[in-house]
Amino acid sequence: MSISYRQPGVVLTDRRFTVPLDHADPGGESIELYAREVVAGDKAGKELPWLLYLQGGPGFGANRFIGRGAWLDRALDEYRVLLLDQRGTGSSTPATRQTLPQRGGPAAQADYLAHFRADSIVRDCEAVRAEVTGGAPWTVLGQSFGGFCTVSYLSLAPEGLDTALITGGLPSLDAHAEDVYRAAYPRIERKVTAHYARYPQDIERARRIADHLLTHDVVLPNGYRLTVEAFQSLGLMLGSGDGSHRLHHLLADAFVRTPAGPELADAFQEQVQSLLSFAGHPLYALVHESIYGQDARATAWAAERVRAEFPRFDAAKTLAGDEPLLFTGETIHPWMFETDPALRPLRETAELLAARTDWTPLYDRDRLAANEVPVAAAVYHDDMYVDAGHSLDTARAVRGLRTWVTDEFEHDGLRSGAPRVLDRLLALVRDEV
């Protein structure tokens, strides 16, 4: 039963769908998907084309907008929008430390989670489309990992697409996880260097916090063990438009004076635990490297292994000298399953996923080369999360794909630049620019 209700300027309808866990076994186990239909209040009774939004991640549910927020405002001018919680996220049969034990032990959990990659998400979308549009193709807007899913959509089921729009999410078609991270660490270092150029006072602040963590055992209020490596991973913030400024404010108030000497402030710890905890999106940690698995090679904690090739990220060595501490970001490491209480029960499951070698291809080069779906993609010039070089290689491999390469926005340009980013992509696919 669908339930409709109103927010300022929009009518919302909660929708639920049942799909197979394994689309190769349609008569087997099923899972539930949740999506929120959004239409402008003054267009609620009209026939409108559909736009499906695929959120970034992996592991995040779709945005919970209030009214006509961000890019949604522009989309509602002409579309009826479906905000899908991809399988395992949000309200779609969540996969967490609380729910996964229902599957059985770690081996059963890993087998279950092997069905949570882009190919399964595309098959979910096709099942949903049959119910929602009556079979008519729709426009898909994919942000970040949602863009990865969109390229899989073009490979697996292009007949379901009227138009494809991608923001910060053109993946390499054949790079292994190691190749992805080998390209990522230099980008991350550039972002950190740019941050310190903007806020030189943060060099000493970051070194002081790191030194404190190397000499003290710090456990945050939620049970998260704050190691120096965990502190460095706050560099994830530097990939967003306002992230450098937010990191600066965080570092500025890290310490307070106490009778026992300087300690990390409660307010600092509270903010840090909310930034580092995977409690709200454990799938991001569990299946992150598997989104790059397409051959008979295990991902095997690729980000951790490749980090050893970049010794400048070693905090202990940095503090022994006088170099600035380098932050990290957009990388998942095995120690996260020890420091984070939301991930600790899933450590063995994560190890099994990292060792898996039966990943199947997510992209079809031949089909992409013959593509007939209008496609436009925003490529952010120095995107910290997705390598622009990899994205442009893929753009050249997809017939008819038009790119907008810009340094005006960071990876979250769809949010911070809305509605201009969506406007530009629509203009590109309509040959208006």
Image (tube, grey):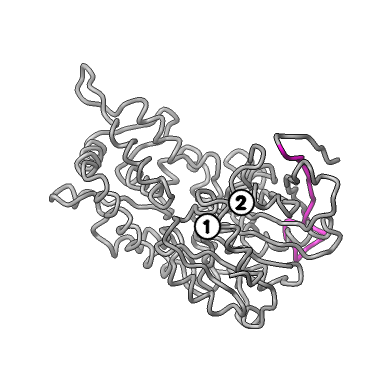
Q: Please report the bounds of the magenta region as a residue range.
A: 9-29
Kind of residue indicated by mark 1: Leu
Kind of residue indicated by mark 2: Gln
* Magenta highlight on residue 11: yes
View extreme (top): residue:
259
Residue on which the image places disc 1: 352
Q: Is residue 150 above or below residue 416?
A: below
Residue on which the image places disc 2: 109
Distance from Cα at disc 2 to Cα at disc 1: 9 Å
Residue 411 in the image: state x and y as whole percent: 47, 56
Quadrant where the N terminus is found in the figure: top right
Quadrant where the C terminus is found in the figure: bottom right
Q: How many marks?
A: 2
- Residue 359 left/right relative to 19: left
> Which residue is painted at 56% across and 66% down in the image?
377
> Which residue is painted at 71% across and 62% down in the image?
139
Task: Give the mark, 2 or 1, whose residue is nearer the N terminus.
Answer: 2
**Is residue 101 visible to us here?**
no
- Say the numbered circle drawn on residue 99: none
